[in-house]
Amino acid sequence: MIEPASAASWVDENYVLRIPSALSPAGAAPLLCAGITTYSPLRQWGVGRYHKLAVVGLGGLGHMAVKIAKAMGTEVTVLSTSENKREDAKRLGAANFAVTSNPQTFTKLQGYFHYILDTVSAPHDYNAYLNLVKTDGTMILVGAPEAPTPVQAFSLIFKRRRLAGSLIGGIKETQKMLDFCAQHQIESDIELIPIQQVNEAYERVLRGDVRYRFVIDMTSMD
């Protein structure tokens, strides 16, 4: 006799995501966070072919933004404080790379981008980046600095710019993201670790020593 499943084992199909077979479980896991966080605003604001997009920060969010935007046909420029991210940016699909610690970057790229996707959660000057946006362009925040960041009115008034924000996405959009990533063979760059190394991994996160997401191998709990 087959016992009926307990109530705790039932899942409402409206809240279930299908992971395409083209994606590996470990490479797909961070897509449910970093993937949808970057895919959603790119879709919502219609970023695509013939657009110029700057991705600010090349970390867990930024590296997914580069991959997804590249697959959408967008010209991607990575803006980073770290010169040692240049090769990674090109490998991930960025057409251009610029170091923001160089003041000439903000002069050279003034008014260049249709969109900026800002993934950085450390304090930084939004106004400096807004000046890189074209007329009627949009800067979208997905990073979340702890302290309030001043925004000068003239950074928006001139060139009719917009400053917007985005979080993640719903089930339907997340499924579209997964299918898109499967179609374009996009996974998160991950380091698979056993559960026993979680404290060491956390220390590396604090040092910024991650390329670009840790995934815990749950079989290591056996």
Image: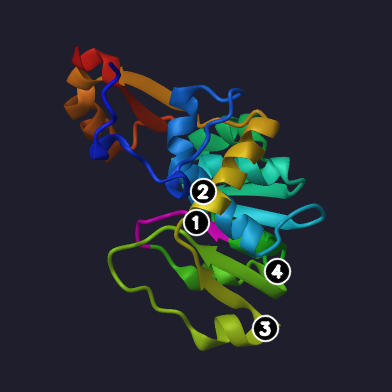
Judge the density around disc 2: few (<14), some (14-19), many (≥20) Cα neighbours within 10 Å. Answer: many
Tell me how the rendering is colored: rainbow
Is the C terminus in the top left, top right, bottom left or bottom right quadrant? top left
Residue type marked 1:
Gly
Q: Residues within 10 Å of mark 1 (few under 14, many from 20)?
A: some
Asked whether the residues under the numbered discs 4 and 2 touch, taking CB atoms below 8 Å apart as contact, a structural biologist would say no
Residue 74 shown left or right of residue 82 in the figure: right
Q: Are marks 1 and 2 in contact (CB under 8 Å)?
A: yes
Question: In which quadrant of the rendered image does the N terminus lie?
Answer: top left
- Distance, label 2 to label 3, CA atoms, is 28 Å
Residue position marked by numbered label 4 in the rendering: 111
What amino acid is labelled 4 in the image?
Gly
Which mark is drawn over residue 169? 1
Q: Could you say which disc has been placed on residue 160 in the image?
A: 3
Q: Amino acid at mark 3?
A: Arg
| Disc 1 secondary structure class | loop
